[in-house]
Amino acid sequence: MLRCYFGHHKCGSTWIEAICGDVCVETGHRLEIVFRQQDLGGERLAAHVRRTGTEFLAYANAGYDEVAALPSFKGFHVVRDPRDVVVSAYFSHLHSHPTRDWPELVDYRKRLQSCDQHAGLLLEIDFRAEQFDEMMSWPDEAPNVLQLRYEDLIASEYKSFVSVFRHLELLDERHFDLKARAANMLHRFAARVGGRSLGRRGVPVERLLGIVWEHDFEKKSGGRKAGEEDVRSHFRKGQAGDWIHYFQPEHRQRFHERYAPLLRKYGYERDDRWVED
């Protein structure tokens, strides 16, 4: 059965993909990351998955039309407050995001560098249109998909990822005594060397928690705690709700005019009072 992670730009995808990658190493599944459907040279995502025999798909910029056509799968979908996406994307596009596989970013970065932060955030609000259309394309409930918000994920990382891999049927929840631990070490070695799990049920819970711990924000950011900002780092701040520190009235109004339904769709706002607060 195909397992899937469905994400969106600046919704924790680098972090989540790293954790999925380590779980795949443990269980012997092959992880494939597809950033955009356009990167497949005209091939549809479902056809690509069938042709390549992909076992675990990380679809980093996921529109639901491609997802709905996939063969039988279980997956999880992560979204983030789109206002925080704007702020995170602005600093990333201004300073840290690689341009090697995204040549369009070169000219856009020059535009951001040519204006002040206020104007740059307005540019970024408009630049996010394609991504926010992709987020809007998802139904409220998608079959076999566990829906998560990034804010809830970072608030309870360990419980959230246990829920994710339990949903994906890649979690081994047996009690591990000394004999089971020894067998687990052999399985890990076999998975790393041979690329297959030799029938193992999944990643042990304690190992999964260790993987999540290994990818903690403080380690990824070079020792900074969540909330300590480095605008030039890909792991800039690691904190939810940061948009409120950057959005001025004009940003609020522009965002509201373009994307108000998206906030209501994912439960970030119930009404429009935030625009004037």
Image (cartoon, grey):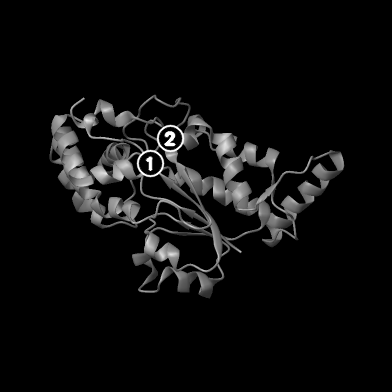
Looking at the image, which is closer to me, 23 or 98?
Answer: 23
Q: Quadrant of residue 193?
A: bottom right
- For residue 151, the mark is 2
The correct choice, above or below, for 126 with respect to 57 in the image is above
Looking at the image, which is closer to me, 274 or 171?
Answer: 274
Q: Tell me the quadrant of the picture where the N terminus can be found.
A: bottom right
Asked if residue 268 lies left or right of residue 190, the reply is left
Q: CB of mark 2 within 8 Å of CB of mark 1?
A: yes
Q: Secondary structure at mark 1?
A: loop
Residue at far front of view: 271
The residue under the point 32% across, 29% down is 242
Residue 163 image position (x, y, % from top left): 59, 43
The residue under the point 60% across, 53% down is 168
Asked if residue 162 lies left or right of residue 244, the reply is right
**Crowd band around label 1 with a 10 angstrom C-alpha radius: few (<14), some (14–19), many (20+):** many
**Is residue 238 at least partly visible in the picture?**
yes
The residue under the point 72% across, 51% down is 188
Looking at the image, which is closer to me, 149 or 18?
Answer: 149
As shown in the figure, which amino acid type bears the numbered disc 2? Glu
